[in-house]
Image (tube, helix red, strand yellow):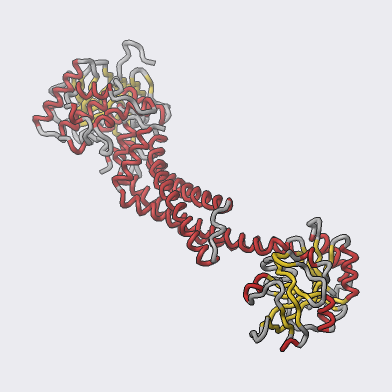
Amino acid sequence: MAGTMEPVIRFADVSKVYPLRAGDVTALSHVSFEVERGEFIAIMGPSGSGKSTLLNLMGCLDTPTSGDIFISGIRIQDMTDDELTDLRRDRIGFIFQYFNLFPLLNIIENVNFPQMMKAGEVVDETKAVEVLKSVHLEESLHTHTPLELSGGQQQRVAIARALINDPDILLCDEPTGNLDTKTGASIMNLMTELNKRGSTIIIVTHDPTIAAYTQRTIRIVDGRIA
Amino acid sequence: MNAIFWEISKRNIRLHMLRSSLAMLGIVIGVVAIVSMGILGNGMVMLVSDSLSSVGDSVIVMPYAGGGGMGMGGGGRTADLMLTEQNFQQIKRVVAPNLAVPVHSTSERMNVGVNSDDIIATVYGLPPDDVPDMLQLEAGSYNNQDSGCLVGTTFAKDHNVKVGSRISIGSDGQYGTLRVTGIIEERGMSFDISTDSAVVVTDKWFENTYDVNGQYDEVVVKVTNGDTATVKTTIEKQLNRNIKEKTVTVIDSKATLETIYETFGTITTFVSAIGGISMIVAGVSIFNIMMMSVNERVKEIGIMRSIGTRKRGVMTMFIYEAGIIGVCGSIAGGVLAVLAGYGISALMLQTTEYLVTVSNAITIFQGVAFGIVVCLACGIYPAWKAANLNPIDAIRHE
């Protein structure tokens, strides 16, 4: 289990190979790195370099072909699907380029969703309201549905949803890719603010201006860390 | 399971109300078809049961006619096709202590009152002492004299006959006039004697009138302990010793009743199965809309899985959706089926008195349950498919 000084993410000689009919494709080759608690990191690389594979592995949506991955000190290989799901729910917050909120639920319900998965029952709104306040979303919007909100507002809701279970890591996949420059900047300012409050944030991006907000950049080229 | 899945399922059905309503309509039609056919079948069984159950303890012995059959009452009279006094005495001996009643019967013209139209009805000749054991009266008293007779309730109603009325038997009353002493209670269809539209006279009057002394059309054995099968076998053993030349045909009314009930049961099952085809079609429709629902929400499922929803949660969400359609459609179908059953019973059976029965309640419950089970069964594969989508592929789905 996690020790007090354990990195939140540790990749040890991780490779990921996709077996295809035309031949095996190596998406990641012998990748090793660590992310310490409280870091703000950008992962950059050209298309097809292995960024998405790396994100999927960090998010426990996939498992490596070889090597070891530890999330908060927990080795994810050989975990069952339910165990990986619970790990994602409790320790990882996902933020997507297209927000990916549930259109059938209102804002409070969207934010509360991971909390309800954890509790197995309906939970009260107190924490969701608190988290939405921390991402600067007006309270009058709480009962609206996602489609009634602007892109920037939807992304704030998505960030609140990612934060609701107090995860160890926030994994962001091009979080400003679907926003205009001004709104993107405000979202990145929010990310910076969250990092200052202690959140570990990893952003996958190809935009150097976004990477400029972070403390460290990991560059991936042809499945290897450059 | 988590209430949020229930909420999402409800909202998704509301969002696609037309599609969901059409799927529900399929289930409604399926349940109505199955249940109304079941109600009709139950009604038929009960109608026949009410008509026949009073003769469930009888064994009927008739002269062997070569191919069997139930030539009850009336018809021509041939000495070869009559039971003899010796036959009767043999039957009486082997069935003792059960009561054996020799029966004469024929069709005859008759008139009620003066200048009335000719009536053709069956005339039964029975020993007066045995009549109270076979027939119940709704009015008047049993007849012990050759100048009197009993009439069936339908006969009495149709021809305005009352106790004390006079009936002239034969063309122009050639066989004399009989005074009605009693009206026989309704018996319905019977294997032994069908008295509702008949006249019952004494055996002595019948034998003297038609010159059939010691010749009987049939013998009815009233079995007191209910073991009609044993009585039937005993009679056959005694009277049909010569296998090549059988003397009698023996009908066990209880066994025949059971066969009739089984036949009606089979018919009911068959017509319900035809109704079941519409349920299968409805099931295919549910399967189709559930697959559509899954395909439309692949990305949503991917997001749910990535942020911590277990496979079981996703599956539950889709099962709830199929369940809501199934429960609503089936209950609506059950209610409409009662109305349809009422209409069909009134139309085909001419009565609705058999509608509120335990068997119909069971039929409705089974129909509704079957509708729900079909919906859930048709929702399982789409739900399983949704739950087992690869989250990475699902998130990328456009």
Residue A97 on image: x %, y %? 20, 34
Of the pair A174 and A93, the residue shown nearer to us: A93
Of the pair B24 and A164, the residue shown nearer to us: B24
Inspect this view and state whether residue B326 appears: yes
Quarter occupied by residue A100: top left
**Rendered position, B211 above or below B276:** below
Q: Residue at x 70, y 84 (%)?
A: B109
Residue found at the far top of this picture: A4
Tell me if B106 is positioned left or right of A27 in this view: right
Inspect this view and state whether residue B262 appears: no
**Rendered position, B379 above or below B349:** above
**Rendered position, B221 above or below B5:** below
Residue B7 on image: x %, y %? 34, 37
Quadrant location of the N terminus of chain A in the rendered image: top left
Residue A140 on image: x %, y %? 18, 29
Q: How many marks?
A: 0
Quadrant location of the C terminus of chain A in the rendered image: top left
Residue found at the far left of this picture: A182
Of the pair A106 and B105, the residue shown nearer to us: B105
Residue A18 on image: x %, y %? 34, 37
Tell me if B100 is positioned left or right of A90 in this view: right
